[in-house]
Amino acid sequence: MAISLLKKVNALINSPGHKKFKKRVHEALFETSTTIGRIFDYILLGLIILSIIIVIFETVPSIQIKYRSVLIFLEWMLTIVFTAEYILRIYTANFPVRYIKSFYGIVDLISIIPTYLGLFIVGSHSMSIVRALRLLRVFRIFKLTKYLSQGEMIIAALKESRTKISIFMFFILLMVCIFGSLMYIIEGGENSGFDSIPRGIYWAIVTLTTVGYGDISPSTTLGQFMASLIMISGYAVLAVPTGIVSAEMVKVSEEAKDADKKECDRCGELDNLKHARFCHRCGERLL
């Protein structure tokens, strides 16, 4: 009986009708150039935005008290829809494992987990706000993938500058430890705010980053002088990492431009466009 059932299932899976259905669903879920694919993507974006709005409104006490049951119902309905969509994506994907491991696959999975966790952990469903990451599909839907290259350039620049930034951050860490300790020595006896070195370090971090909460402030003349020096130094904290990353971005941008150009074997011209067939300087045919 089990064998006959398996044969029936296998026959159903391999039937022309099922293959046509699977192809149609794949077209709706993964293709953005087709009409049905675009319609589905627009609907999906609308549901994602609606889900984000619901999660936000759930945290407003007056709305939660009045519409709690409605919000919970809508949240579960949307979660079921997103769960079904995720399962169908795995089922109809040409390479299911590749989709599961992809960025969008991971985001799709993470976006549905918080609601189910809410059954066991109170308040965890609020993490459904991560569904906002699914809005990144807008780049694919509206053919804006060319703008993603700019983001890749920023990431590449950050990777290239990570060593310099790490050294700079280590130096800043040493600075706040020293300044915090000095302020404890200077202010500790007369200012209750600086009652320990960790509190002094906290103040130094807040001051050096130009945040300035104002919950702790120096009261002695020497302490205020030290604070002035730290405030001035704070501008360097903002300027140095920005300069490092900017320099790396220029470098990455130049490398990208060089990668899109061809060198002429005859005259050595390096400024030929990648798609050029002939050298713009001597007319030699480019390989």
Image (spheres, rainbow, N blue to C red):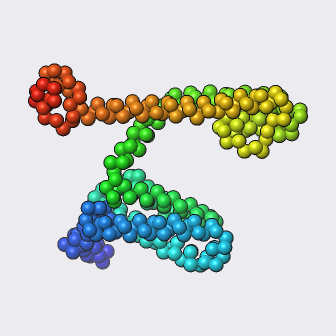
Q: Residue at x 23, y 69 (%)?
A: 19
Instruction: Give the image quarter of residue 264.
Output: top left
Count of picture labels: 0
Residue 92 seen in this snapshot: no
* Residue 160: x %, y % from top left: 44, 32
Determine which quarter of the picture holds residue 159: top left
Residue at 44% in and 69% down: 47
Report the residue at 16% width, 21% height from top. 267
Is residue 283 among the parts visible in the rendering? yes
The image shows residue 190 at horizontal and vertical percentages of: 89, 34
Rendered position, 170 above or below 86: above
Q: Nearer the viewer, residue 232 or 184?
A: 232
Q: Residue 97 falls in which quadrant of the image?
A: bottom left
* Residue 193 point in image, percent of width and height: 83, 40
- Residue at screen point 69% across, 39% down: 206
Quadrant of the image containing the N terminus: bottom left
Asked whether, in this view, residue 146 is left or right of residue 56, the answer is left
Q: In screen coordinates, is 170 left or right of 140?
A: right
